[in-house]
Image (cartoon, helix red, strand yellow):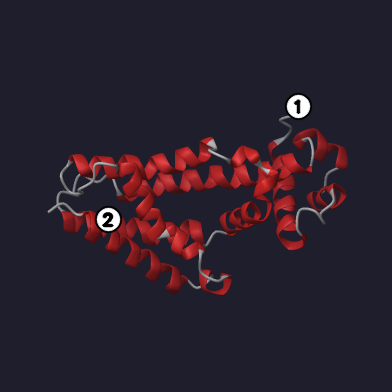
Amino acid sequence: MSEKPVREGQAHKRAAILTAAQELFVQAGVERTSMDAVAARAGVSKRTVYDYHGDKRRLLLDVIEAAGESALTTLRTLADDHLTSTEIRDVDALAQALTGFAVDLGRSLLMSSDYVAAVKLIAENEPLLPELDDHPLDRSHARVLTERVAHFARLGLLDTEDPELAAEHFQALTTLRVLNEPARRRAEPATVERIMTDGAQVFVRAYRAA
């Protein structure tokens, strides 16, 4: 059975609803958050919330997808800033670029309240959201770094026959290590920077071309 179609609506109202829903879902949990509470915090009618998002499950998915779109924009921007320079001609320059990319990723993304909220909501509600399995956003996130790894492998700076796997290893050594830290430590900029720096350097030592 198809879900009820939803309205596009006005951008500022949609943004207010998503912000309110995210805050309440994180604070009280999805099950204990009513659509009335979301509407009240967003300053809109409950009908507007239903018209724009269909139901609470769809609203949760929209909150997570909005955070994912924002994270993808950040990831692409940082990759363009750090990993496309024509000055990256040797492994030392690549190591410096990857470290800068990782540190900025930690500052811009992993310490973002929206991103951290989305990670928490996914962990707590994944069974409710089968759409997240092999989601296009996940593939887009993975493709950003995979394309950069493949580029540097073609230049002879990285040694890998599987750029996608190498990109997964970079994520495991950096992003996932931060997310596995207790919340208090994830909020410490120095801790995040150290983990991201160490992870990028370990990645280069593992994959640098001989």
In the image shown, does 172 or 201 lie closer to the viewer? 172
Question: Residue 153 sits in which quadrant?
Answer: top left
Vertical relation: 92 (above or below) 165: below
Q: Which residue is mark 2?
A: 97
Is residue 114 left or right of 149 when viewed as pictured? Answer: right
Name the secondary structure under disc 2.
helix
- Of badges 1 and 2, the one in the foreground is 1
Q: Residue furthest left?
A: 210
Residue at 51% in and 48% down: 71
Q: Quadrant of the N terminus?
A: top right
Residue at coordinates 81% horizontally, 33% vertically from top-left? 51
Which secondary structure, mark 1?
Answer: loop
The residue located at (44%, 64%) in the rendering is 177
Place of residue 120 in the rendered image (x, y in percent of width and height, measured from the top left): 62, 58
Compare marks 1 and 2 and give the one earlier in the sequence.
1
**On the picture, is 90 further left or further right than 53?**
left
Residue, disc 1: 5
Report, in whole angstroms, how far the alpha carbon at label 1 lies from the one at label 2.
Answer: 45 Å
Crowd band around label 1 with a 10 angstrom C-alpha radius: few (<14), some (14–19), many (20+): few
Quarter of the picture holding the C terminus: bottom left
Residue type, label 1: Pro
| Numbered disc total | 2
Residue 162 drawn at (x, y percent): 29, 42
Q: Is residue 97 left or right of residue 130?
A: left
Report the amino acid beneath label 2: Ala
User: Which of the two residues, 142 or 7, is positioned nearer the viewer here?
Assistant: 142
Callout 1–callout 2 Cβ contact below 8 Å: no
Q: Examine the rendering and report whether any part of residue 11 can be seen.
A: yes
Q: Quadrant of residue 197?
A: bottom left
- Position of residue 55 relative to residue 107, above or below, is above
Residue 13 visible in the displayed image? no
